Amino acid sequence: MVQQHMRGGGAVAVTAAVVGAMASGCSAAADATPGPDPAQAVRTASEVLARAGTSKARTSMEMATGGTRVTIRGEGAYDFATGHGRLKVVLPRDPSGAEGHRPITELLAPGALYMKNRGAGVPADKWVRVDTAALSDGNLVTGGATDPAAAAELLRGARGVRHIGEEELAGVPVTHYRGVVDLGHAARAASPRLRAVLAAAAKGFARDSVPFDAYLDREGRLRKVRHQFGFANEGRTVAVASTTLLYEFGAPVSVVLPPERDIYTGKVGM
């Protein structure tokens, strides 16, 4: 059951904060007999997921900056029919070896990201709410985990798609595809729920094209996708590889969005 308590304002720009606070794909020989049209298969992946309903999800986001590579990991569940999800995001240890930040609880909703344990100065019982369409990356990078629906909808802009081969992922037979996403086209082809978010991303990333590897099961459901973004931060480009893994389709998903009184509207520290 989803209860929505949305808030119009109070968006907090934390794009640089996630990167600042912290300081792959598979390959196989190409198959000569690809079968279904590769481009059509990946472009319709988000529609197949919407029909599938729900799944559990694991995410990872690898960032390379200043000669250092860090990885943020998330785990939770997502409802593709409603666009709601819940993730527990774990930040890496401090470069000094000290224990990392507390895990961040993220609630994903159409047009909004809610975060708990996010940033210095935020009371422990409060949430930070972000208007995702107002972020320069559309929350593909900001929260440390790409919204699973957005990861799938990006594939609507797939170009130059190649069939790489048949593989097995966690015991499930999958077909591996590789290509690039045209961000502008993905935004124009996106569902109404994510159109503004992807339009923001199309304007905010350092590159218009995003290389991807996608893995679809025999029912056409997206099981894994890896995007390689070029994210501009403080005048330099940060290489960001975002991977989303989907499994246990049909798993129950319960997301209760926080009421307005629990939303923090003050300044969020690093």
Image (tube, rainbow, N blue to C red):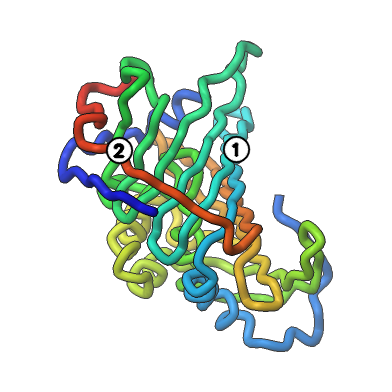
* Residue underneath mark 2: 258
Q: Residue at x 32, y 30 (%)?
A: 127
Say which amino acid is labelled 1. Answer: Arg
Q: Tell whether 213 sits left or right of 142.
A: right
Decide if residue 265 is in sight here. yes
The quadrant holding residue 196 is bottom left
Outermost residue, front side? 1
Query: Considering only vertical position in the picture, is 118 above or below 147?
Result: above
What amino acid is found at the position of numbered circle 2 in the picture? Answer: Pro
Depth order, front residue of 51/68 = 51
Q: Residue at x 34, y 22 (%)?
A: 125
- Work out whether residue 131 or residue 232 is closer to the camera in this orientation and state it: 131
Eye-nearest disc, 1 or 2: 2
Q: Check disc 2 and report its element: helix, strand or loop.
A: loop
> At which x and y percent is residue 179?
60, 69
Q: Position of residue 110 (x, y in %)?
A: 32, 55
Q: Which numbered dot is residue 73?
A: 1
Q: CA distance from mark 1 to mark 2?
A: 23 Å
In the image: residue 28, left or right of residue 44: right
Q: Secondary structure at mark 1?
A: strand
Q: Residues within 10 Å of mark 1 (few under 14, many from 20)?
A: many
Total numbered labels: 2
Q: Position of residue 51 (x, y in %)?
A: 50, 74
